[in-house]
Image (cartoon, coloured by chain):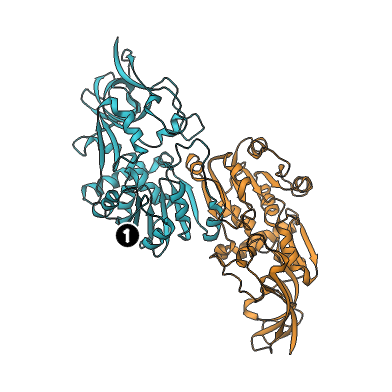
Chain colours: A orange, B cyan
């Protein structure tokens, strides 16, 4: 039997995950069955939401099992096929395991075209990342021309796309990020109107007020915590707050506390809604089409942080919580 | 010149308001002008939201001015009229001042019919209270038959109506209140399926789970604070949380802290929205009609706590924060 490198979940992290929570091991590859393909992993997506799956608290996706492989969005190449729909050399995307080589049912995979767009972008700008940005902003944010959009985690994978789509839709766009370099990038590369470096800003409430003089109509929240508390002081009547993620509190060991949002929401008749891209599956095909078109037209730019090497997948994931990525974090095998 | 008893705002309260924040004084009544009427106050509505207007922090309604009369929803009788639309003896409703006698423009008043419903109910069940319950539940809660509705401040003016409308719409309804007597009333008088006394319950998370075994689909929140924190652990996927009030934190001197709601909302794709009845003015006439019909059909019951005497208006207001009212608190002059 052939074996493959594999990365299992070793421990459920308490607080911040560390490299010792992962088990670098090998697994056997069983025989190819009818309807299956043998895959070689090409690109692995690492995403903050995976932190939730490492715990066994109830969430919108089931937790990873201990001593079993972690999985995420992966682009792979077909090495062998016992499916009519896929042939050797095809590139596919799917929710796959952190293994160098693996079997998968063809029906759970979608073919991607490397001539249409770089393979890694199917995990990012024209994949779940882009769809999260587009559908979160449109379906919950309901943007209207001339409104002010504030984005936290703005230099991250989703945030950088949200801001650009905001500009396409005619919004004033302000981004919050953690270094001056990132803030510069928001403005020079992604067309944000203004940026705030939360690490060097003493008074976030004031900084948001200064950069959003007409108040905040839409807040696309990737971070939660104190940054999001400060935003509440600046929301306009009928503001929409899209809760896409809360990376700042994912590693908390206690249920995190922050400002009571209720008084702010009632004062401003504001809406706050959790967004999960999977809930809008019926809008994915149209969304991907829209993103691909904008990309081709040069209206959307994307940034990737590509880490190389299978063994570096866990570290790349850990680096997300240090903000070491600019744009989408992907591991190339 | 004639004078009238009047109650002014003396101090902006820090924390809980006290009786010394009010100034019992007299004011002059100027001459009746064209288009005006002279009114004698009959019923005065006292409501938790008035606390917000006593501070000068920005809110959805402008703050009261110091050393000027407080105002709220009032039912009055026309004593003299220089308006074509109102004659002596007419009963009217309007946002009026805490004065025994006052002038008002007829155009800002609406005639009410004492033969159709008791006068005080125009301030309650078929007034803003009923509309708040009906429109908050329908427009934000979007109830579906068979879902579970949880109501905090359930024995209060709005809460007791919310629960009854929930039953009319086919929901399982659970109420949270502060005494056993109130909890009994919810079940025996208002048809709630279950009730929780938060003052005698040690583990609110568990109590909500026990009384809402299928989870909470809609949470109508009148109180905020720790009670609402406990609800978050019990919300279902796609839950809707209507933030109608946050009486538990209105008197806090510091911006209150509570659990970070963001992780809960994103895990459950849940919505939380501030509700202010004035935002839905276009739906008021139809709503009043619906409430009046249910009332006539005996499907809606209402409870009033009627305090007597003009000088008792401030104390009745203060008693709201002690939960001394059952149902709508009204002062009869």
Q: Quadrant of residue B117?
A: top left
Q: Position of residue A9 (x, y in %)?
A: 66, 72
Res. A268 in view: yes
Position of B144 with respect to B305 (left or right) is right
Res. A333 in view: no
Q: Which residue is mark 1?
A: B170
Residue A44, relative to residue A206: is it above or below? below
Q: Position of residue A318 (x, y in %)?
A: 72, 62
Quarter of the image that includes the N terminus of chain B: top left
Position of A172 with respect to B71 (left or right) is right
Tell me the crowding category of disc 1: few under 14, some 14 to 19, or many 20 or more residues within 10 angstroms, Cα based: some
Q: Position of residue A66 (x, y in %)?
A: 62, 74
Q: Residue furthest top?
A: B1
Quarter of the image that includes the C terminus of chain B: top left
State the SS at label 1.
loop
* Observer-nearest of B16 and B295: B16
Q: Residue furthest right?
A: A308
Q: Which residue is located at x 41 percent, y 31 percent?
A: B17
């Amino acid at each position: 039997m052939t074996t493959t490198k594999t990365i299992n979940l070793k421990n459920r992290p308490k607080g911040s995950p560390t490299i010792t929570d992962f088990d670098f091991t090998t697994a056997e590859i069983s025989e190819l069955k009818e309807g299956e393909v043998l895959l070689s992993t090409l690109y692995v997506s690492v995403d903050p939401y995976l932190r939730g799956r490492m715990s066994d608290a109830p969430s919108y996706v089931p937790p990873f099992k201990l001593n079993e492989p972690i999985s995420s969005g992966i682009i792979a190449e077909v090495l062998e096929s016992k499916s009519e729909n896929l042939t050797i050399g095809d590139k596919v995307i799917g929710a796959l395991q952190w293994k160098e080589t693996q079997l998968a049912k063809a029906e759970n995979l979608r073919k991607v075209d490397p001539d249409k767009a770089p393979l890694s972008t199917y995990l990012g700008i024209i994949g779940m990342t882009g769809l999260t940005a587009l559908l979160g902003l449109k379906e919950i944010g309901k943007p209207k021309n001339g409104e002010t959009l504030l984005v936290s985690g703005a230099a991250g994978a989703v945030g950088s796309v949200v801001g650009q789509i905001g500009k396409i839709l005619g919004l004033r766009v302000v981004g919050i990020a953690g270094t001056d370099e990132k803030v510069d990038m928001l403005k020079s590369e992604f067309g944000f109107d203004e940026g705030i470096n939360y690490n060097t800003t003493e008074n976030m409430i004031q900084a948001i007020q200064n950069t959003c003089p007409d108040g905040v109509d839409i807040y696309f929240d990737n971070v939660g915590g104190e940054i999001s508390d400060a935003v509440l002081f600046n929301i306009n009547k009928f503001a929409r707050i899209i809760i896409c993620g809360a990376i700042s509190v994912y590693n908390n060991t206690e249920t995190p506390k922050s400002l009571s949002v209720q008084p702010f929401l009632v004062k401003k008749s504001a809406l706050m809604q959790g967004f999960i891209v999977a809930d809008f599956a019926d809008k994915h095909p149209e969304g991907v089409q829209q993103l691909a078109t904008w990309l081709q037209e040069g209206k959307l730019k994307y940034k990737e942080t590509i880490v190389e090497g299978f063994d570096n997948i866990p570290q790349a994931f850990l680096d997300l919580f240090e903000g070491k990525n600019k744009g989408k974090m992907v591991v190339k095998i």
